Image (spheres, rainbow, N blue to C red):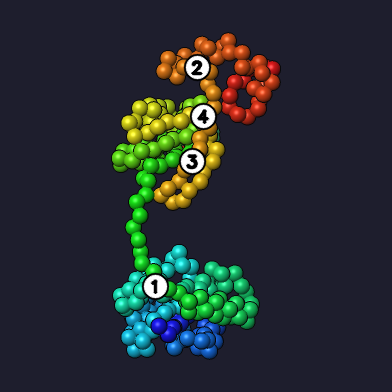
């Protein structure tokens, strides 16, 4: 299929057009191989802007589209939908970011326009070689790892666990609670800190969907979205967790406090005995 490319340069009000000569960029795009139509328009993401693309697809037989506007994070999905509604494969689309990458960061109008032209030329060249893609659905592992058992991590873990998903809550110190566990009252309501925190600490410890890993740290993360593998190092506690009531009696006579690496002030939140 011979590429028939439409190029659309967005003014984004004065956001882009205030710094970039958008008409000049549109003119330059017309010179490129495969470009059938090239226009500058006030707001490409508006309904009339979207309709303009759809009309051109029909009228000029476009099979590829480039929009030079804001960040793809903002509107790539919008334009892919426009292509789909116009009967094209949504991946025959390329976006050039001439706002965040050009107009917002370049003072000189001439230089901004030249850079915009170069980015549009690159996008046109790239879309020229696009292949039609199909969206696939793949199963993902919904288990979640929450790192840090302060109030934020505790609350996140509880929310996720309550929605029915398995959570691994990793806390590097011996107990969850974080800073809030050290406070008496919390600003601005002056609520009793422990009254809010303690029930949540108990809940994360007993929730059937939460595996609490205190005194542990993330050592390695590999894999990809939906299929991460994480290696956790559980530090030695030298106690039998099933029998521990947390009374602290054993700590009073613990020989570990006399080892030089556990001298007071080493910042690991561990034993604080004198060396
Ligand atoms: C003196 C003081 C007074 C404050 N007063 C108020 C107040 O009145 N009102 C208010 O709203 N906020 C107050 N704050 C702020 C409040 O502490 C925080 O908003 C809140 O506790 C932050 O919670 P958090 O879970 O985000 O972080 P934290 O409580 O800091 O918890 C982070 C947790 O993550 C763990 N962690 C860190 N790195 C890792 C890692 N790599 N692996 C595993 N675990 C890790 C830490 O050990 C810790 O348990 C105060 C803070 C301080 C210091």
Is 272 on the left-hand or right-hand side of 196? right
Is 113 on the left-hand or right-hand side of 64? right
Please tell me whether residue 239 is drawn above or below residue 41 in the rendered image.
Answer: above
Q: Judge whether residue 237 can be spotted in this image.
A: yes
Mark sitting on residue 132: 1
Circles 3 and 4: CB atoms closer than 8 Å: no
Q: Nearer the viewer, mark 3 or mark 2?
A: 3
| Structural crowding at the residue carrying mark 4, measured as other residues with C-alpha within 10 Å and reported as few (<14), some (14–19) or many (≥20) | some
| Labels 1 and 4: the sequence-earlier one | 1
- Label 2 CB less than 8 angstroms from ligand 1: no
Count of marks placed on residues: 4
Residue 97 percent across, percent down from the top left: 51, 71
Q: Nearer the viewer, mark 1 or mark 3?
A: 1
Circles 1 and 4: CB atoms closer than 8 Å: no
Please tell me whether residue 145 is drawn above or below residue 128 in the rendered image.
Answer: above
Question: How much space separates mark 3 and mark 2, taking CA atoms?
Answer: 25 Å
Q: Nearer the viewer, mark 1 or mark 4?
A: 1
Question: How much space separates mark 1 and mark 3, taking CA atoms?
Answer: 35 Å
Query: Which residue is under mark 4?
Result: 234
Query: Which residue is under mark 2?
Result: 239
| Structural crowding at the residue carrying mark 1, measured as other residues with C-alpha within 10 Å and reported as few (<14), some (14–19) or many (≥20) | few
Please tell me whether residue 19 is drawn above or below residue 171 in the rendered image.
Answer: below
Question: How much space separates mark 2 and mark 1, taking CA atoms?
Answer: 60 Å
| Labels 2 and 1: the sequence-earlier one | 1
Question: How much space separates mark 2 and mark 4, taking CA atoms?
Answer: 13 Å
Residue at the far front: name it. 1
| SS for dot 4 | strand
Query: Which residue is under mark 3?
Result: 230
Task: Name the one closer to the observer, 231 or 59.
Answer: 231
Residue 53 percent across, percent down from the top left: 37, 81
| Structural crowding at the residue carrying mark 2, measured as other residues with C-alpha within 10 Å and reported as few (<14), some (14–19) or many (≥20) | few
């Amino acid at each position: 299929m011979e590429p028939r490319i439409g190029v659309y340069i967005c003014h984004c009000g004065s956001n882009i057009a205030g710094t970039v000569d958008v008409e000049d960029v549109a003119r330059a795009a017309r010179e490129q191989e495969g470009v059938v139509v090239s226009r500058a328009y006030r707001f490409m993401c508006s309904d009339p802007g979207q309709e303009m693309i759809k009309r051109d697809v029909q009228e000029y037989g476009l099979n590829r589209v480039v929009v030079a506007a804001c960040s793809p994070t903002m509107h790539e999905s919008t334009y892919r939908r426009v292509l789909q509604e116009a009967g094209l494969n949504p991946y025959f689309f390329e976006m050039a970011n001439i706002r965040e990458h050009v107009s917002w960061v370049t003072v000189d109008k001439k230089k901004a326009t030249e850079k915009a032209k170069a980015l549009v030329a690159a996008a046109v060249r790239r879309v020229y070689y696009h292949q039609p893609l199909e969206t696939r659905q793949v199963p993902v592992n919904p288990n979640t790892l929450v790192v840090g058992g302060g109030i934020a991590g505790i609350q996140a873990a509880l929310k996720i666990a309550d929605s029915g998903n398995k959570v691994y809550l990793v806390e590097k110190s011996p107990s969850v609670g974080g800073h809030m566990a050290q406070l008496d009252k919390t600003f601005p309501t002056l609520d009793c800190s422990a009254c809010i925190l303690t029930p949540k600490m108990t809940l994360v410890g007993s929730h059937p969907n939460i595996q609490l890993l205190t005194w542990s740290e993330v050592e390695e993360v590999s894999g990809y979205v939906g299929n991460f593998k994480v290696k956790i190092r559980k530090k030695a506690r030298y106690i039998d967790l099933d029998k521990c009531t947390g009374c602290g009696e054993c700590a009073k006579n613990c020989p570990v406090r006399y080892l030089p690496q556990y001298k007071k002030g080493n910042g690991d939140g561990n034993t604080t005995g004198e060396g």
